[in-house]
Image (spheres, grey):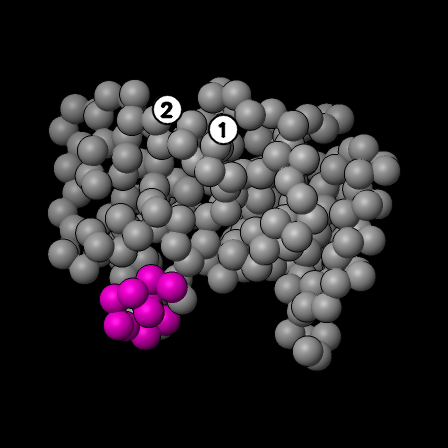
Amino acid sequence: MSESANIRVAIIEDHDDFREGLYQILQGTVGFRCVGRYASLEEGVRKMPETDVVLLDIHLPGKSGIEGLPLIKQKHPKAQVIMLTVYEDDTNIFRAIQAGADGYLLKKTPPARLLQAIEEAAAGGMPMTPFIARQAVAMLKRHAPSEGETVQFTPRESEILALLTDGLNYATIGERLFISLDTVRNHIRHIYEKLQVHSKAEAVAKAIKHGMI
């Protein structure tokens, strides 16, 4: 695989040993390239080059990962952000999803699974451990729908939104529905416009919260 085909990954993590361990895993694996590693959210936002995936800790000096996530999305709208944290409580999961996280994994995730998750995120998926995913769905369903929140989806958009909720990436959705990747992206763009969101996680969270799926 050529260097240009590598998945570009940035790391924002204040624990030196853990950050360097992630760097060594990425640099030592074919198909991945670490384009930057930073000890704070502010440093990451200031210095990070164009990247495909960001591994973002929650507990950081200065702004937390959740507080800074919108800043990353604003500066790098195409980057997929995976929260990589020790926190597995409802509050942090909910806040991260609402802020636009594209995945949520624990730091104890084995390296092989972490690399797989990075690939999934880069391909349009929303990687979470099964435990975190169950918590997220159960938690979001507990939130009552807002009054008058109605969005009309086409049958195909409803199918795609349901598959997004199941954690499928864009390519797999296309294969499942026998449509091209570009068609999937076109439908998802319309879904985002109707829901007034900017990420897969936001779309899924809002759809579940308002009983749209």
Q: Main secondary structure of the magenta part?
A: helix
Task: Locate the C terminus by quadrant.
Answer: top left
The residue stretch that appears in magenta = 172-181
Question: Can you tell which mark lies on residue 93?
Answer: 1
Answer left or right for 187 relative to 3. left
Residue 87 in view of the camera: yes
Figure check: 182 above or below 43: below
Q: Is residue 153 magenta?
A: no
Task: Locate the N terminus by quadrant.
Answer: bottom right
Q: Residue at x 46, y 38 (%)?
A: 130
Q: Residue at x 51, y 39 (%)?
A: 129
Q: Nearer the viewer, residue 21 or 97?
A: 21
- Bin the neighbour count of mark 1 within 10 Å (Cα to Cα): few under 14, some 14-19, many 20 and up: many
What amino acid is at disc 2?
Answer: Met
Which residue position is annotated with label 2? 139
Q: Residue furthest bottom?
A: 2
Residue 4 x, y percent position in the rendering: 68, 75
- Bin the neighbour count of mark 2 within 10 Å (Cα to Cα): few under 14, some 14-19, many 20 and up: some
Q: Please tell me whether mark 1 sits on a helix, a strand or a loop.
A: helix
Question: Can you tell which mark lies on residue 121?
Answer: none
